[in-house]
Image (cartoon, rainbow, N blue to C red):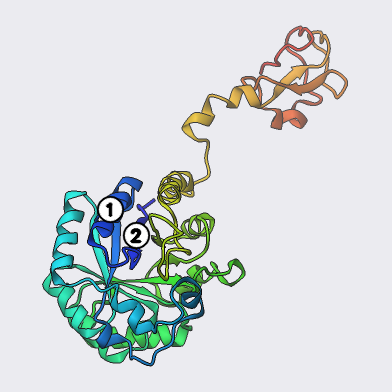
Amino acid sequence: MKKTLIIAEAGVNHNGDLNLAKKMIEVAAECGADFVKFQTFKSKNCVSINAKKAKYQLQTTNQDESQFEMIKKLELDLKAHQILIAYAKACNISFLSTPFDLESIELLHCLGLEIFKIPSGEITNLPYLKAIARLNKKIILSTGMANLGEIEACLDVLCKNGQKRSNITLMHCTTEYPAPFNEINLKVIQTLKNAFNLNIGYSDHTKGISVALGAVALGACVIEKHFTLDKTMNGPDHKASLEPNELKSMCQSIRELELALGSGIKKASKSEKKNINIARKSLVAKKAIKKGEKFNEENLTTKRPGNGICAMRYDEFLGKIAQKNYKEDELIRE
């Protein structure tokens, strides 16, 4: 099976602190993630001063501040990006960031990013989609809140403006923090695969790691999951994020699951083969049988080991003549 790409979403859980952001890069690398992802935005370009906070943001941040005021404190400037990109390279993990406005798209392009993550909220943002499409990068496109028609319209815009379709990975997603289990609808992974014939991933906002593992089992080739150094920290996304020990457990479990999924070909595995003769049964004398006597249900049975005549041939031997004397429990021979 192809390796599942694991994106550890730092997002804005650095709280605007560069040292905290660097620590998150270290943790993501130590836990086994392939990418560590941040968010790139200019507050003045993507949120109006009148924009309200989401319900979950009101529960996890200062209720007296606006959404603009909340995210303004979480911006990363050009210098911060340069430092974090270099630090990620030193930690041997790939750097990603989600742009939320046109200026941020250009910033990430100039910094040399080869993969662009489009968040669910931008799937209906025409100028934004056109700007990314013209770069023809690899795209990871989250589809939270969208229906098939909106996804198709988004793909149409991207491809008509220069984006190579085969470089797009769709991400199933439920845009709520945390997302309720009964609204995840993991079967959509196969629906998206059938509808668009693209690589499909899953961006997980549920508590714990079980749903992410289920997504891998259903064929998700990319898993994205928010993480934090401490769920009790102040900030909009900490509460719905994994702590380091949980992130590590998720990464390890995904790698184990990949091994377990295998090829899909049903046959005895290498480790099973040595157990065939131990676990299966052969034709055995139920009691002493004399040469010339017919095999019947009274003198023929099936028992372990399985290195004799296969028990599946039981009916075939009924009525045959014994060619030798047999003791009780002796394997029958041809």
The residue that mark 2 highlights is 7
* Image position, residue 71 (x, y; %): 33, 77
Q: State whether residue 175 appears in this view.
A: no
Q: Quadrant of residue 323?
A: top right
What is the quadrant of residue 108 in the picture?
Answer: bottom left
Give the x, y percent position of residue 250: 44, 50
Residue 214 appears left or right of 327? left
Q: Is residue 138 above or below residue 86?
A: below
- Looking at the image, which is closer to me, 64 or 131? 64
- Kindly tell me whether residue 94 is visible in this rendering: yes
Describe the element under mark 1 as helix, strand or loop.
helix
Q: Is residue 51 rendered to the left or right of residue 167?
A: right
Q: Assign the C terminus to one quadrant of the image.
A: top right
- Residue 299 appears at what percent x and percent y? 84, 18
Distance in Å between CA atoms under marks 1 and 2:
16 Å
- Label 2 secondary element: strand
Left or right: 295 in relation to 74: right
For image coordinates 21% across by 49% down, the residue present is: 92
Label 2 is placed on what type of residue?
A: Ile
Whichever of labels 1 and 2 marks the residue nearer the N terminus, that label is 2
Q: Nearer the viewer, mark 1 or mark 2?
A: 1
Residue at 53% x, 36% y: name it: 268
